[in-house]
Amino acid sequence: MSRVALLSNPSSTGNKLLLPRVRAFCAEHADIFHYEVEQVDQIGDALKSIALVQPKVLIINGGDGTVQAALTELYQGDHFEGAPPPVAVLPNGKTNLIALDLGAVGDPIVALERVLELARTDMVDHVVSRELIALSGGGSNGRPVLGMFLGGAGLADFILYCRHKIYPLGLPNGFSHLLTALAVLVSLFLGIRAAFLPPSPANVTVSVFQHGERKGRFSLLMVTTLERLLLKSQLPTLAGSGALQLILVDRNPVVLLRALAAAFLGRLGGDHRMAGVHLERSQEIRIEGDQSSVILDGELFHARMGHPIVLKPTQPVPFLRLAA
C-alpha cells in the first residue's frame, strides 16, 4: 500500500515549472504513488487506479479546474471501497483558495513533504470535514458539478476580466490581482465604461431557501463552504443554518470597500451589521438572471431567467489540514 497518492495535471499553468521538481521528489520517495493525467476527463480512470493502491491521503496537484474535476469524480465516482481517503491540495494555481483553507501555502514541495510527514502518523488531529457545493443547471449537463467556492455577479465579471485581460500580460499573480482590484475600483467609483475595464454587473436574482430573495446588481456574490479566503481572512459568522455561506454586496463602491475592510479586520458578520451587505447561511441557493455568470472553482456557468443555477451542499468530505 502506498502511503500517499499524488494526482498531477501537467497541463495546469503552475505545473509547467513545478512538475519536474515534483517528479524528482516522488522518485526519491517510494511510498508516493504518482499518477499524471493529460486532460481532466482522464481523472476518473486515474482515481480507479489510485484506489487500487489504497492510499492514506490523496493529493491533488493542479489548477482550479483539476481540483474541481477531481472532487466531482471523487464524490460521485464511487471508486473507493467505503469512505475515500482525506484530500490534500498543493498550493499550485492562481488563487489557491482550497489550499489556503487547508493550510497549504508557500512552496508546493514543502507542502508535499508536510503531507508525507502527516501520512506517517494517525493524522487524527489533521483530518477535517468540509461539505462541497453541488451545482445543477447553468450548463452542467444534468450531472451536479462539485466545488467549494462560487463567485457570481460582479465578482464573476472581475474574475473573468483578470483571467482574460490581466493574466495574459504575464505578471506575477499578486500584482495581477492588485491591478484587477484597481481596475474594479476605477470602474465602480468613476462609472467609466471601456474595453480595458471590467463590465458593469448584470441584474441577478438570488433566492435563499427560507430567507426570501434579493434582486439587483451586486458588486460581489460569493457562496462557499470554505472557512478561510484570501488575505488569510476568516469567514464571518453568518445568520441562519446550512453549510452554504452566502455573502452578497450591493453595487456601491463605498459599501464594497467598507465590506472588504471589515472582512480583513474580522468585523464582518455576527453583531456587526452593514447596510448593503447581506450575509446568510442556507441549505439551498438559487441564482438566475439574463447574461449573468457564475464561476465554481474556475469553471464557468451561465444563469438564465426561468432556468436557475441551483446550489446545495453535499455530505461532508474528509480533507487533510496541514496547519497545526
Image (spheres, rainbow, N blue to C red):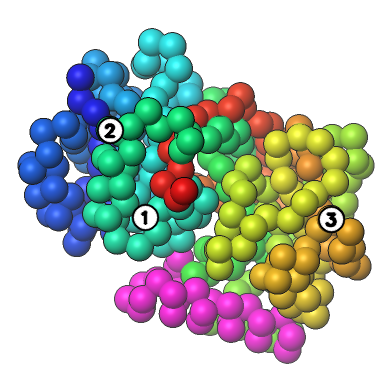
The picture quadrant where one finds residue 92 is bottom left
Viewer-nearest of discs 1 and 3: 3
Position in image of residue 189 (x %, y %): 74, 86
- Eyeballing the image, is 138 above or below 233? above
- Residue type at mark 2: give it: Arg
Q: Which residues are magenta?
A: 163-190
Q: CA distance from mark 1 to mark 3?
A: 30 Å
Location of residue 166 by image quarter: bottom left
- Mark 1 sits on what residue? 91
* CA–CA distance in space, label 2 to label 3: 39 Å
On screen, 74 above or below 231?
above
Q: Which residue is mark 2?
A: 120
**Between 181 and 132, which is closer to the camera in this rendering?**
132
Front residue of 257 and 161: 257
* Mark closest to the chain's N terminus, 1 or 3: 1
Give residue 292's position: percent from left, percent from top: 68, 54
The span from disc 2 to disc 1 (Cα, nearest Å) is: 21 Å
Quadrant of res 236: bottom right
Q: Is residue 197 left or right of residue 261?
A: left
Instruction: Please provide percent x and percent y for residue 151.
Output: 62, 54
Amino acid type of the residue tagged 3 in the rendering: Gly
